[in-house]
Amino acid sequence: TFKYSLPRGKVAAMFAESIQGVGGTVQFPKGYLKRAAALVRANGGLFVADEVQTGFGRTGEHFWGFESHDYVPDIVTMAKGIGNGFPLAAVVTTPEIAASLSQALHFNTYGGNPMASAVGIAVLDVIEEEQLQRNSLEVGTYFLKGLAELQQRFEIIGDVRGKGLMIGVELVGNREKRTPLATPHVLDIWEKCKDQGVLLGRGGLHGNVLSMRPPLCLCAEAWNLPWRHWRKRLNFI
């Protein structure tokens, strides 16, 4: 808690993903981040939203993940998806906070790249013109329903969670006890899916959560590929 972990009740900043990505696609309880932001500010700190994975419409409901938590961060970090494969990252904050840089030395070898900036603007245009945020919501909902059906059939799937096209599938050895599936079995499923053209990430404390972060332009029909291969692999575990 803040009371017992902070020296003299002071904090510089708290960083938080709106949905924990590498942490296993874990969603915070309702109201958690809003209360956390209030506590950080009450102790003199800033609240930083890490939108590298959840930003740019990936969660479907909102353009930024933090919007689902009913609070406004002091600083927002973003990267990866903002450039659609081109190296690009950004930090967005208020003029007052940004002015603090004038009191220190900041250097970035690739900062201010005009080509990267043009790419970022083009990506924003495409997201809006092709309605990719809405597509993320619709296709993600379709994927989640399909995964929920697989969960009913296979005890190895302990949980299916996520929003939009940010999805996690937790693999377990015992669903009742939520015992993580043994790493060799997780790796077998992961590698076999890769061999068949289904690229997944892995996350979670025990590395047993398969992560789906497909392109926002993905169509619903694309679900047939992972569904077919997951069903095939899970039948042998």
Image: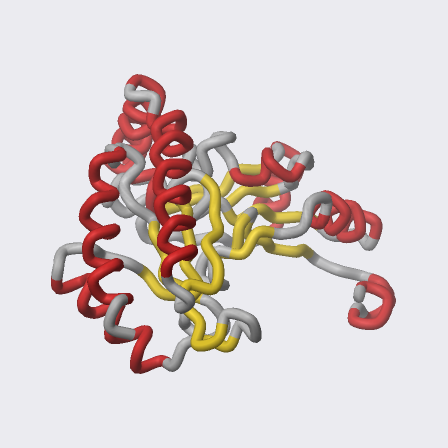
Residue farthest top in this picture: 129
Q: Position of residue 193 (x, y in %)?
A: 20, 62
Q: In the displayed orientation, state which residue is furthest to the front.
A: 153
Is 101 displayed left or right of 42 in the figure? left
Q: How is the rendered protein coloured? A: secondary structure
126 or 59, nearer to the observer: 59
**Residue at the left extreme?**
196
Q: Residue at x 82, y 70 (%)?
A: 7
State left or right for residue 75 relative to residue 144.
right
Please tell me how many numbered marks the rendered image carries.
Answer: 0
Measuring from the top left, give residue 139's x and y in whole percent. 34, 34
Q: Residue at x 41, y 70 (%)?
A: 208
Q: Quadrant of residue 140?
A: top left
Q: Which quadrant of the view contains residue 112? A: top left
In the image, what residue occupies the spot 42% across and 55% down?
152
Is 188 above or below relative to 100?
below
Q: Nearer the viewer, residue 201 or 187?
A: 187
Q: Quadrant of the C terminus?
A: bottom left
The N terminus - image quarter? bottom right
Q: Return the residue nearer the eye: 122 or 164.
A: 164
Q: Residue 30 appears at what percent x and percent y?
A: 69, 45
Q: Is residue 141 left or right of residue 95?
A: left
Name above or below for residue 177 compared with residue 91: below
Q: Nearer the viewer, residue 48 or 234?
A: 234
| Residue 39 left/right relative to 173 | right
Instruction: Look at 78% across and 46% down and name the residue there.
Output: 38
Residue 113: x and y in percent read 29, 39
